[in-house]
Image (cartoon, rainbow, N blue to C red):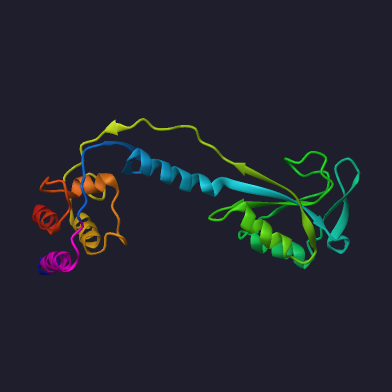
Amino acid sequence: MKKFRRILAALISAAVVGAASVAPVSAIAVVFLDGQYLTQEEYEAKRDEILSQYRTAHYSIDVEEEYLTEKLDENGKIVYAIDPETDLYENLNIINNSGNSVFHDGGKVPFVEDSAYPGVSVKLTGTNEDSVADKIKNLNGVKGIVDVAVIQLVNDITPVPNDVEPLSGDLSMDGKVNIVDAVKLAKHSADPTAFPLLTYSQLAADINGDGELTNADLVALIQMI
């Protein structure tokens, strides 16, 4: 019990020392996704973040002959592929980060009809095709990039916003009010930029209902625990 009281005292102290976070809030429609209540704007930002993990760029590259090897395709036709024993193959895997670059033989490049060039598909996460292209072009053995095709997984499902009445004090959105919520609000009060709150959490944090978040809300939240 004494330890718990010390924690509450520390939270109050942090709130008093930290800059008050003044954030006008109002009841608005939200959607529920992955355990979080999000405004339409917050949902779209999260959706874009998720979809960015499913972008793949395919580069058809013109490679110097010494970096290629011959092989037979399923029809017995001789095609060319990047030799896996070369530093080019290794460096392309490094660019791909995961080591799962998919090298395609000449004439087998997806998305590029009748391509006679080897290609590599690189999953794009937290980057863009132009920056990856620059890295590929600077590798030994690459004479140039013939074509770039970007494939983006698209999800057209948009959830319907619903009016939700936030549970007062439930910043963590778990349906209950406890020390976790108090810590969350204390951190936000001390540094709103480093510890931002989603709209639902802002609504839940406005304990006294005055339309802004201040140290008074943190004190009221602690008294609820």
Residue ID at (46%, 32%) = 157
Residue ID at (86%, 45%) = 73
Rendered view: 68 above or below 210: below
Give the residues in magenta: 5-21
Which quadrant would residue 43 be assigned to in this image? top left
In-image side of 193 versus 93 (left or right): left
In-image side of 125 versus 18 (left or right): right
Pick whichever, 156 or 105, lies toward us.
156
**Main secondary structure found in the magenta portion:** helix
Which quadrant would residue 36 be assigned to in this image? top left
Residue 46: x %, y % from top left:
42, 46
Rendered view: 193 above or below 112: below
Quadrant assignment for the N terminus: bottom left
| Residue 174 shows in the view | no
Residue ID at (75%, 62%) = 89
Pick whichever, 36 or 158, lies toward us.
158
Residue ID at (51%, 36%) = 155
| Residue 127 shows in the view | yes
Does the magenta segment cover residue 16? yes
Residue 138: x %, y % from top left:
72, 65
Does the magenta segment cover residue 39? no
Quadrant assignment for the C terminus: bottom left
Residue 194: x %, y % from top left:
32, 62
Residue 130: x %, y % from top left:
63, 54
